[in-house]
Image: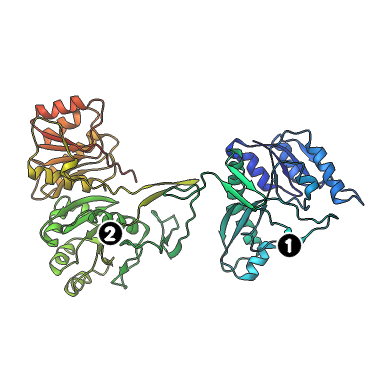
Amino acid sequence: MKLAGMASNRGRNLMNIADRSPGGATVEVILTNSADAPVVEQAEKRGIPTETVVQKDGESRKEHERRVVDALSGYDVELVCLDGYMRILSDTFLDEMPTTLNVHPALLPSFPGMDAWGDALEAGVSVTGCTVHVVTDATDEDGNVVESEVDGGPIVTQEPVPVYEGDDSDDVAERVLYQGEFAAYPRAVEFFAENRVEVDYEAERVTVDGDDGGQFPKRRLLSNDRATELRYGENPHQDAALYADNTADEASVVHADQLNEGAKALSYNNYNDADGALNLIKEFDEPAAAVIKHTNPAGCATADSLAAAYDDALSTDPQSAFGGIVALNRTCDAATAEQIIDSFKEIVVAPGYTDDAMDVLFEKSNLRVLEVGDLGERTEELTEKPLVGGRLVQQRDLQSLDESDLEVVTEREPTDDQIESMLFGWHTLKHVKSNGILFAKGTETVGIGMGQVSRVDAVRLAAMKADEHAEGKDAEGAVMASDAFFPFPDGIEHAAEAGIEAVIQPGGSKNDDMVIEAANEHDMAMVFTGTRSFRHD
């Protein structure tokens, strides 16, 4: 789509549109009514032709607009975009030209007029923004401006922008421009460039095809409240803060109560690790415990009692568990608390605590004790990852497998006990950074290889952890879980050397036949899940 821009001053929105070319739109010409408008120089730097049509002394609005139309008549344009064009346009212009858009620095119909920023401050609002609307005739038959009709055209899109305590008009104007107009105006142009817009002038309504809701709407608007400023971010040279989504009703470390208020506040890394730990133990209905280090499980287990589950989880890798995060899916009792304080831990997260357990845990002044309340259901459906210049949003990995989901692909069938270990390992592995490999016996981990760029190295790391770090257990006779398929048989070969007797993996490699053959040669049972469980964050 080719468009004409019209501005009386700097035309920063027009230059932003020219630079970004939303929907492939190009700015064919910039027209101004001011001979010294800075936008002319900026347009010329970009190789955009310019036209200047200054209103002459005694020239009427309509006469001036006819000359503007004449100046643009030599250009093939399909859309006109105003940006601080300090003239009210009448039907003399609008009837001759294609659809004309304007951007107003407020959320219309609130704060129309010339001082939208000051009006917003005076009204004491906490949110203002901008509006891109279709320009309609706001003059009477004699060419006089009808104030009530100014900025009254159908709305194409809007963008909210916060107003903070202590802001002045300059603060609001700058924020509205850079956070509001620079987002909304290119979006509106893209709508037109993609031929998705229908303007109903009689109904004063704009309809944008595909601009609907659903899980992944065309536009996401999020509002989070700052819960606290943190001491620093991942590293001491990085500032950080925690923002809370107060609409979330799932058990969360963000909304957890820190029971020992005298202990130091949680850090950026503490929140990140505690969130990972809590998400892991939500996988299990049985009493479960997990120890997390740098968002990876150092160990996880379920058992008949919470104390037994914690003991099994810790014994997977007690060395790495030093300074880790403990998560429990039951009320913490004194027996479990006594085990937790036997070695240094940063945080313990649980639905609740008995009085005796709190007495024990509070003996450690630097151990933060978080109570998240009833775990309930996992209701948050999306996860997101900020990127420089945007964010990735995806469905949360809530897959839950049972025996019926497993396809046996080897000559040897897995035993009931191995299937139990496979399913435990799979649901734990979802929380291990990829490439991830997990060894399990019963419903406890015995070795975890995480975050490797080679799947074979992840197998070797899990074997090393089981042989050198685990206490009272090893990989002999264990089950191996892999978060993605084995591209070659070498991962199976190394697993066999470690003593693995059964494997759960997604399958789907072009070399599946070779991998299955290797498992058969080592008398392993192997099942395919048909789905992988990568976790890259």
Number of disc labels:
2
The chosen color scheme is: rainbow
Q: Amino acid at mark 2?
A: Glu
Quadrant containing the N terminus is top right
Residue position for label 2: 377
Q: Amino acid at mark 1?
A: Ser
Q: Residues within 10 Å of mark 1 (few under 14, many from 20)?
A: few
Q: Secondary structure at mark 2?
A: loop
Residue position for label 1: 148
Residue that protrudes farthest toward the front in the picture: 202
Q: Quadrant of residue 347?
A: bottom left
Q: What x and y, as percent, mark residue 126?
A: 56, 66
Q: Of discs 1 and 2, which sits in the foreground?
A: 1
Q: Residue at x 23, y 50 (%)?
A: 297
Could you say which disc has been placed on residue 417 in the image?
none
In the picture, measured across the screen, residue 522 lies left or right of residue 103, that is left
Mark 1 and mark 2 residues within 8 Å of each other at the beta carbon: no
Q: Residues within 10 Å of mark 2 (few under 14, many from 20)?
A: few
Q: Residue at x 15, y 43 (%)?
A: 403
- In the depicted view, which residue is nearer to us: 241 or 431? 431
Mark 1 vs 2, N-terminal side: 1
Q: Residue at x 65, y 53 (%)?
A: 204
Q: Quadrant of residue 439?
A: top left
